[in-house]
Image: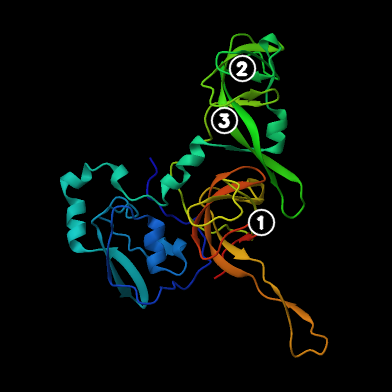
Amino acid sequence: MLCLLLALAAGWARAEVIALNPDVQAEYVVKRGDTLWDISAYYLQHPWQWPELWQVNPQIENPHLIYPGDVLVLTWVNGRPVLGLRQDSLNRRMSPRARRSPLDDAIPPIPLEAIAAFLQGPRLVERDEWEAAPYVLAFADDRLLGSLNDVTYARNLADDSERFWQVLHRGQTILDPETDKVLGYEGIPVGALRLFTFDDPAEGMLIDVTREVLRGDRLFLEGAPPLPGTFSPAPPEGDIDARIAAIYDESTQAGQFQIVAINRGSEHGLVPGHVLTLEKKGEKVTDPTKSMFRSVRLPPLQIGYMMLFNVADKLSYGLILQATHGVEYGDLARTPRF
């Protein structure tokens, strides 16, 4: 279950002014299908400022859980905008029936269905992890390709290894746009290997095969790394200046609710939930007032936001939450500027 929780780290105080969007309505009825990001983006120019806008009511156990049918009311207190629940929504929240309502009814922070395919599809694997992983050595009867129920031999397994392993084929290579070095690969699931022995080579049988298995395919423990139980969308504390290193489905451009990888990770202070602005590098133009028509680089053009949900050491995957232009390889992903 992913709870609807938007909490900023203690002591974080980058934004002193809560900037509202123009022409917002005083009341907003939460609809099924809404996300917290949708509602935040409706009210705020900087949607991650939600906790600074929300009026904490001590009668509500978790004010950041909101449900379809709740009516949000925008008021002003001491010159600052404040968002709370209308009284009838509060009354419903306080009823015994509401207290028994499952938290799964709460609206999610982001459209979780947008990353469902990622959880079942290719895995983000860093280069060093891929190179060190156990691998398919050969198949019985000198076969070149492996299929369902084929006897298969593997190497680089410890004596006390697990019996069931996911078989990954190397997919898209993820290059660092700044250095052209290989950051990692998309590991495409092609089946599973059930081990019978742990000798060198180990022996097993292919099961749950979805496509042909190749010699050299890597073995990983089954299942993609789990998502965190909650997301805390907030800008990174440090200055991040990353580049788009890959688009999940190998398209040339990505838009809203598509997944992209960046060339920064936990080594750079990133964690799941960090929000970054997406920017196009400023174009070079000529200055018409100069006799030699000197070129000038325009400032970067902000085109949207992304939120990280899968962070490795040197690279991360994120979901594009808003985009006014197509996001491309090499575009910028930076700490938001107020």
For this rendering, which residue is in front, 268 or 332? 332
Q: CA distance from mark 1 to mark 3?
A: 27 Å
Q: Amino acid at mark 2?
A: Ser
Label 3 sits on residue: 189
Q: Secondary structure at mark 3?
A: strand
- Left or right of 33 in this view: 134: right
Q: Amino acid at mark 3?
A: Pro
- Taking the spot 55% from the left edge, 17% from the top edge, the residue there is 148
* Residue 227 in sight here: no
Label 1 sits on residue: 243
Q: Quadrant of the C terminus?
A: bottom right
* Residue 117 in sight here: yes
* Circle 1 residues within 10 Å: few <14, some 14–19, many ≥20: many
Q: Secondary structure at mark 1?
A: strand
Closer to the eye: label 1 or 2:
1
Sequence-wise, the earlier of marks 1 and 2 is 2
Q: CA distance from mark 1 to mark 2?
A: 37 Å
Q: Quadrant of the N terminus?
A: top left
* x, y percent for residue 179: 77, 52
